[in-house]
């Protein structure tokens, strides 16, 4: 989908309905940039409040129900590239 077509809003609608119906215990929202995760937490997903957290350094606090993370934050950039990406 193109920029501005409502991808995050659509994701929120799906996640909210799964969460509200208690169909899933934990839900993960993945993004490729920090700004997208931070913006989503502050705006579209703000209704989740303290039920939501951002995964950093592969540490998952299971006290939450909604998780936001970067692809690199849960898989490890070294594993994606096959080497330490910071040394390029």
Image (cartoon, grey):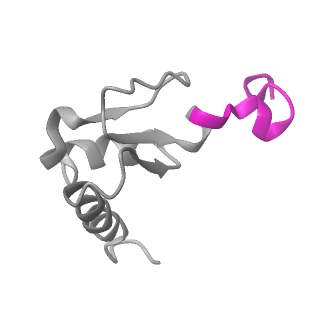
Q: Nearer the viewer, residue 3 or 32?
A: 32
Give the answer, above or below, for where 61 lies relative to 21. above
x and y percent of residue 31 in the render? Answer: 48, 50
- Magenta highlight on residue 23: no
Residue in the image at 27% along x and 67% along y: 9
Q: Residue at x 30, y 61 (%)?
A: 18
Instruction: Give the x, y percent position of residue 3.
Output: 40, 72
* Image quarter of the C terminus: top right
Image coordinates of residue 63 in percent, x first then y, are 31, 26
Judge whether 29 appears above or below 85 on screen.
Answer: below
Q: Nearer the viewer, residue 18 or 73?
A: 18
Q: Is residue 76 magenta?
A: yes
Q: How many marks?
A: 0
**Left or right placement of residue 27 versus residue 71 in this view:** left
The percent coordinates of residue 42 (x first, y second) are 20, 42
Image check: 85 left or right of 46? right
Residue name at image x 50 percent, y 21 percent? 59
Which contiguous range is marked in magenta? 74-88
Q: Residue at x 38, y 44 (%)?
A: 26
The main secondary structure of the magenta stretch is helix
């Amino acid at each position: 989908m193109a920029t501005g077509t409502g991808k995050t809003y659509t994701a929120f609608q799906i996640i909210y309905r799964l969460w509200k119906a208690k169909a899933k215990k934990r839900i993960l929202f993945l993004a490729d940039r920090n700004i997208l995760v931070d913006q989503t937490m502050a705006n579209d997903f703000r209704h989740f409040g303290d039920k939501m957290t951002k995964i950093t350094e592969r540490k998952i606090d299971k006290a939450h129900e909604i998780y936001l993370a970067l692809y690199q934050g849960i898989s490890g950039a070294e594993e994606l590239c096959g080497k330490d990406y910071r040394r390029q």
